[in-house]
Image: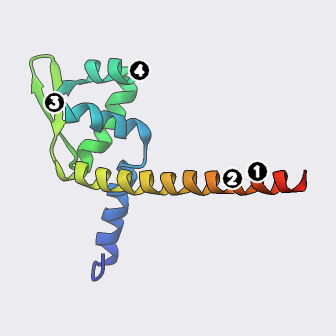
Amino acid sequence: MQGLSAEALEQVATYFQALSEPTRLRILNFLREGERNVGELAELCGYTAANVSRHLAMLTKQGLVARESRGTSVYYRIADESVYQLCDLVCGNIARRFERATRDRQAFMRTAQASARKRT
């Protein structure tokens, strides 16, 4: 980010906003398996086609997905595979933080239990 103009930083922030919605992340995960149309994605996500279309429009605008019309259907596919590397990096970091928090909680519980035994 160092050396980017204010305008470029705004574009970066908008890109991350596209990734800040769980529904859009679910859509990206389903598209990881291959291209799909809105109806298929709506069924997989458990949302209406209109809702999924709105999210796909945002992902398309940010260049994360590409759309292709085929007859009466529109199919979506990943346009920028690097989004998965970014998401995997973030998910790995969150998983490590979760594991640390779990270990800390377990250590606290062992200490608290040991203290309780000493008092009895």
The residue that disc 2 covers is 110
User: Which residue is the extreme one toward the left?
Assistant: 70
For residue 113, which numbered disc appears in the image? 1
How far apart in space, not on screen, are marks 1 and 4 (Cα)? 44 Å
Dots 3, 1 in contact, CB < 8 A: no
Mark 3: secondary structure: loop
The residue that disc 3 covers is 34
Q: To which quarter of the image does residue 8 belong?
A: bottom left
Mark 4: secondary structure: loop
Q: Which of disc 4 and disc 1 is earlier in sequence?
A: 4
How far apart in space, not on screen, are marks 3 and 2 (Cα)? 47 Å
Q: Amino acid at mark 4?
A: Gly
Q: Residue at x 24, y 51 (%)?
A: 83
Which percent across, then down, holds residue 37?
21, 23
Q: Amino acid at mark 1?
A: Gln
Query: In the picture provided, is 100 more to the left or to the right than 22?
Result: right
Which percent across, then down, holds residue 33?
19, 30
User: Which residue is the extreme one toward the bottom?
Assistant: 3
Q: Residue at x 35, y 66 (%)?
A: 10
Q: Amino acid at mark 3?
A: Gly
Mark 1: secondary structure: helix
How far apart in space, not on screen, are marks 2 and 4 (Cα)? 42 Å
Q: Amino acid at mark 2?
A: Arg
Which percent across, then down, holds residue 70?
9, 22
Q: Which of disc 2 and disc 3 is earlier in sequence?
A: 3
Q: Residue at x 31, y 72 (%)?
A: 7
For residue 46, which numbered disc appears in the image? 4
**In front: label 2 or label 4:** 2
**In front: label 1 or label 4:** 1
Q: Residue at x 36, y 39 (%)?
A: 24
Dots 1, 2 in contact, CB < 8 A: yes
